[in-house]
Amino acid sequence: MKKICRILILVLSIFLVPLNLPAQDKITVAVAANFISAFQEIAADFEAKTGVKIDATFSSTGNLYSQIKNGAPYDVFLSADVKRPEILQKEGWTDGTFIYARGQVILWSADSDFCKAPSWCEALENDRIRKISIANTATAPYGTAAMEALRKIGKWDALQAKMVVAQTIAQSFQYASTQSVDVGFCALSATASPDGKKGCFYIIPEAPDVIQAACVAKKAKNQKGAERFAAYLVAEDAVSIKKKYGYR
Amino acid sequence: MDYLALYVTLKLALITTILLMIIAAPVAYLLAYYRFPGKSLLEALVYLPMALPPTVIGFYLIIVMSPKGFVGRIWETFTGGSLLFTFLGITIASIIYSIPFAVQPMKAAFSKIDRRLLEASYVLGLSKRATFLRVIIPNSLSGIAAAAVLVFLHSIGAFGVLLMVGGSIPGETKVASIAIYEAVETMNYSAAGMIALSFIPISYAFLLLINRLNEDSRT
């Protein structure tokens, strides 16, 4: 019994050693899934330049929004739409929102045979396409934009049987890239990744631009660091990284 | 390699295991030795988390622990913070999620103890509490160890409940199972593989440790 206690005390004492940095040296950022690749590069650059560490959580915009509503302690929220940051402003979570990126919906496939048709509408008519991935149209703005494009060309209802719904736009690309589905609606930013370069894609002009807004929490634990990151996000260095990933 | 996520997982699993051993022991004692009206109802209630989908548990925990929920509101008035998306929040979730795995083996171990031992203890003048601590617990260490193994392994495997209640905040609520899921989602298979692989020796080492303790308790 004594021996058990001694081992337990030893093991538990390990957890007293804090692995986390104090709050003033880091910020917590909630990031919409389409922005993951660009964000990782931006965050690394920001950390190197300022010494402020970034803890990031990636998920769909809708999911992050509902987490914030339930009290999640994020300092900065990078949404994939304008609507949710604006609601957060109305509710007093933030003082103001700003646009940091404009994204584009694409139709991506790992198999270049699917890109031989002259346009994406005709490409979707290929009989060999059995499954098409799309991000959740309720929680992922890229999914919503893809749905609007399909409605515009009148194919939304007809294609329902082939649709596979991913929880985030990143997951939609994962399905397409691993060929779990034949083609997938993805973000243009996905094509800048090593896996993204292996496939082919159509830009979807019918899909509205995905305008992405961000905001800083009023109650941010590290207000100064958060403001600094917000400023960095629209400054020159970050802009060139964003451009590389296909954002405008 | 996401060491932070592994660290959070181990910390969560160990704290859950220790707290659950303390919480579950009196419950298992009650279920093993007492008869009272509604006992079968209580027993079913204790085992309910085992039969429910993790997302159902997660849903109700969100309802209760959110700033507008019953527990969340009380918590906020005292601490000013939220319970959801914190380590404490996922610890509570993890405990509720694993209760059946602690109570069931303990109850079985308690029921197996020779009644004559207990009677001898009472005759010699030990109180019920002293008998519980000095006769029942030492005589059912193997059952308690089994409960600890089950709870520990069950809580390092938890995913759905923790994702709903904790989100995925690095160093706070992002456990290894969530880190693997996110690494796969972003096609970072090498990172996913590293964490996945590290589970095997960790789980194996803890099983060996508990087995060792088990043997010691018998000699």
Image (cartoon, helix red, strand yellow):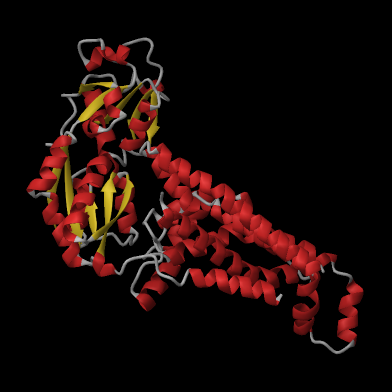
**As displayed, is residue B141 above or below residue A62?**
below
Residue A195, how many percent across, how many down?
32, 29
Residue B43 seen from this side = no
Residue most extreme to the left:
A236
Residue A70's image quarter? bottom left
Closer to us: A132 or A160: A132
Residue A197 seen from this side = yes
Closer to us: A1 or B26: A1
Lateral position of residue B41 relative to residue A187, left or right: right
**As displayed, is residue B205 above or below residue A22?**
above
Residue A120, how many percent across, how many down?
23, 17
Residue under the image location 26 percent in, 39 percent down: A34
Closer to us: A86 or A224: A224
Residue most extreme to the bottom:
B125
Q: How many marks?
A: 0
Lateral position of residue B13 relative to residue A34, left or right: right
Residue A200, how many percent across, how many down?
26, 20
Residue B219's image quarter? bottom right
Closer to us: B131 or A144: B131
Residue B88, how many percent across, how many down?
45, 67
**As displayed, is residue A176 above or below residue A70?**
above
Lateral position of residue A113 relative to residue A103, left or right: right
Give the quadrant of the N terminus of chain A. Answer: bottom right
Lateral position of residue B111 relative to residue A224, left or right: right
Give the quadrant of the C terminus of chain A. Answer: top left
Residue under the image location 31 percent in, 12 percent down: A113
